[in-house]
Amino acid sequence: MKKSHMITVMSLLALGGVLALLSMELGQVECKVCMNFKGRWNCATAAAPTEAEAIRSGRMTACGTIAAGVRDSFACDGAEPASITCG
């Protein structure tokens, strides 16, 4: 095998290892967030490195399907969640 091929293979293996390590660190906390906005109810599960980020992501995802328009999206995202379960 040529030296350039060996360097390419080693580089790809190293990159794969780094990506595997990074993906294992993501999503350490998983939270289910339920939102009740203008009589509409939706729950979403999100994973993130911290609980606060998982809750924020879950809130945004849950609001995405029950809010109508940009103004409602901001209002829903700012509302207090009906329930939060993290584990």
Image (cartoon, rainbow, N blue to C red):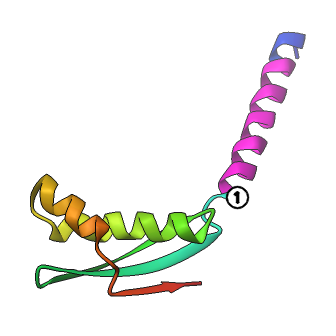
Residue at 65%, 68% in the rendered image: 28
Q: Does the magenta stretch include residue 39?
A: no
Residue at 11%, 79% in the rendered image: 38
Direction from residue 53 to residue 33 in the image, left or right: left
Magenta-drawn stretch, dominant element (helix, strand or loop): helix
Residue 49 in the image: above or below residue 30:
above
Query: Could you tell me residue 72's position as x and y percent?
Result: 14, 63
Q: How crowded is mark 1: few (under 14 residues within 10 Å), some or many (20 or more)?
A: few
Direction from residue 34 to residue 63 in the image, left or right: left
- Of residues 18 and 65, the one nearer the viewer is 65
Q: In which quarter of the image is residue 19?
A: top right
Residue 47 appears anywhere in the view: no
Query: Could you tell me residue 66's position as x and y percent?
Result: 16, 71
Direction from residue 64 to residue 49 in the image, left or right: right
Q: Quadrant of residue 30?
A: bottom right
Query: Could you tell me residue 80's position as x and y percent?
Result: 33, 78
Q: Where is the C terminus found, in terms of image quarters?
A: bottom right
Residue 15 in the image: above or below residue 27:
above
Q: Where is the N terminus found, in terms of image quarters?
A: top right
- Of residues 34 and 14, the one nearer the viewer is 34
Magenta stretch, residue numbers: 6-23
Q: What residue type is labelled 1?
A: Glu
- Residue highlighted by disc 1: 25
- Of residues 79 and 28, the one nearer the viewer is 79
Task: Indicate the secondary structure of the residue bearing disc 1.
Answer: helix
Residue 31 appears anywhere in the view: yes
Residue 73 in the image: above or below residue 86:
above
